[in-house]
Amino acid sequence: MRAPGGSEVAVGDVLLAVEGVSLSFGGVNAVSDVSFDIRKGEIRAIIGPNGAGKTSMLNVINGFYQPQQGRITFKGETRSKMRPYEAAHGGIARTFQNVALFRGMTALDNIMAGRSLKMNKGFVWQLLRYGPAMNEEIAHRRRVEEIIDFLKIQEIRRTPVGRLPYGLQKRVELGRALAMEPELLLLDEPMAGMNIEEKEDMSRFVLDVNDHYGTTIALIEHDMGVVMDLSDRVVVLDHGIKIADGTPDEVKGNQAVIDAYLGVAH
Amino acid sequence: MHLLYMIFIDPFVQMGAAPDLLAQTLWEGLVGGMLYALIALGFVLIFKASGVFNFAQGIMVVFAALTFVGLHDAGLNAFLALGLTIVVMFGLAFAIERSVLRPLVNQPDIILFMATFGITYFLIGFGEFVFGGDPKVMVTDDLFLPKGSVTYHTLGGIVQLQKLDIAATIIASVMVAGLAVFFSKTRIGRALRAVADSHSAALSVGISLEQIWVIVWFAAGLVALVTGIFWGARSDVSFALEVIALKALPVLILGGFTSVPGAIVGGLIIGIGEKLGEFYWGPLVGGGTDAWFAYVIALVFLLFRPQGLFGERIIERV
């Protein structure tokens, strides 16, 4: 069954849940007592006006920020905070709002870097570039080439990413995240700064990733059209507080959301 | 007129008149340059991975050499002592990561830079406490490092090469080539470059900053050990060696702080330039040029290429 406009993957159990998470920097509350969950196979959008705490929330999920309060349950395991290594190891990949690529390296090497957790042949073999390490390198290279084909970036694979246009950099960054074969993919404004055509391409890739690999996706996006088309469920934050949670249609009609976006006369 | 002649013409006339002397000077410059390159390499490794100018690299050279000689003097077999010194350098890298780098994560670079001063003074004190402050003689025979020299009758004269220098050049070349392959072709090398480019992106793909830091500090420690052995064999092992680290500065300015090939080429240019300057232009100012000539070369380069020969040009978008 196909949810309206959303993913075609069967939506299942809860993959990740945050409960009562609060995060402050000094006296500033970035996130206050926020709870929501992300179910297996769904595309979950996190929206809200600027400064709502959306990126902070992603940073909590992948362990960049450690919240002062609250719990995070990922794949049935509950903890008070994530660590970046645990998150990456457990299958959480992400992209960044302001593209964080390894600028000096080629697109291919960037995506290969995404495989680093999956490569574990010994130090000495690597040094010799021989035996198991070489086989491993070849096997992973094959997976990376598949991702490159999938994202249609064959012709730029040898280009240092610093030289690529912004839209392609975002695509390489997505490729690096995909190379981790994540269970949960966090996308921080994947379409920011793109023109309509690039946005359509990126939307297509997001849907394809969800469809093709069955990856659960949580994304932050400002383009409401994109959000409504892509997502199964939407959580809305404003000033660090959750003000709405539901299907795109429910959220669209919610008075608190309309007020948050349009402002309200006091 | 005479002065101009002495500066711009006469040295080249001399070079042409006695090619054997020129070859000898070039060779000595090459050997010195190789050792400068090794020191600079230690700096580059750490600068690439953590953006820190490691002031302690010089003292690490001394500390590694002292540990090695100290263990040997205590009666250990030379190769056992070498192996143990490598273990000690690993322990040092591990301790520095745990006690200095980890608590200072996300601090401005200048704070990490100051912390490396702290490491320097700690190592000076600790080294003197354990091994005493007297200069020591580097172990050479037991390591089977060659002695004596080979003499070539060529270019209408004599060119004499110290065997130790030849060995140093070969070992340094092998080591540099090994490091270059390791850091450009392996997963750990890729991770290192990833960390150098973006800490947060590296973390997001599951690269452990702690592990990478231990590896680069250990690699820098190994480079320090090799540097210490060969430099120590040419003079002796004492804390005065620490100042050779300052010679790495013009090399880095020349080669760029982030480039391994830059460190090597920069080292060779400084080494050769220094020897040529000393031999052909030194007499003009009454000698003593080796203390400052390297900086003059670096200064001239700085005028034309502020980012160094191979350094990354920094373009800030505003």
Image: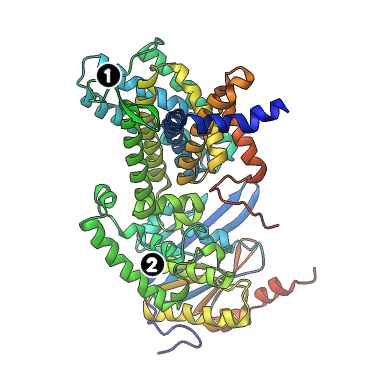
Mark 1: few/some/many CA within 10 Å (<14, 14-19, 20+): some
Foreground pick, B313 / B87: B313
Q: Specify whether B253 is left or right of B185.
A: right
Q: Specify whether A141 is left or right of A176.
A: left
Q: Residue at x 26, y 25 (%)?
A: B146
* Circles 2 and 1 in contact, beta carbons < 8 Å: no
Q: Which residue is mark 2?
A: A179
Quadrant (top left/top right/bottom left/bottom right) for the N terminus of chain B:
top right
Picture layout, residue A124 above or below residue B226: below
Q: Which residue is mark 1?
A: B71
Instruction: Quadrant for residue B233, please give it.
Output: top left
Foreground pick, A95 / B69: B69
Residue B2 position within the rendered picture, expressed as x and y whole percent measured from the top left = 70, 26
- Total number of numbered labels? 2
Q: Amino acid at mark 2?
A: Ala
Q: Amino acid at mark 1?
A: Leu
Q: CA distance from mark 2 to mark 1?
A: 48 Å
Q: Nearer the viewer, mark 2 or mark 1?
A: 1
Mark 2: few/some/many CA within 10 Å (<14, 14-19, 20+): many
Instruction: Quadrant for residue A260, please give it.
Output: bottom right
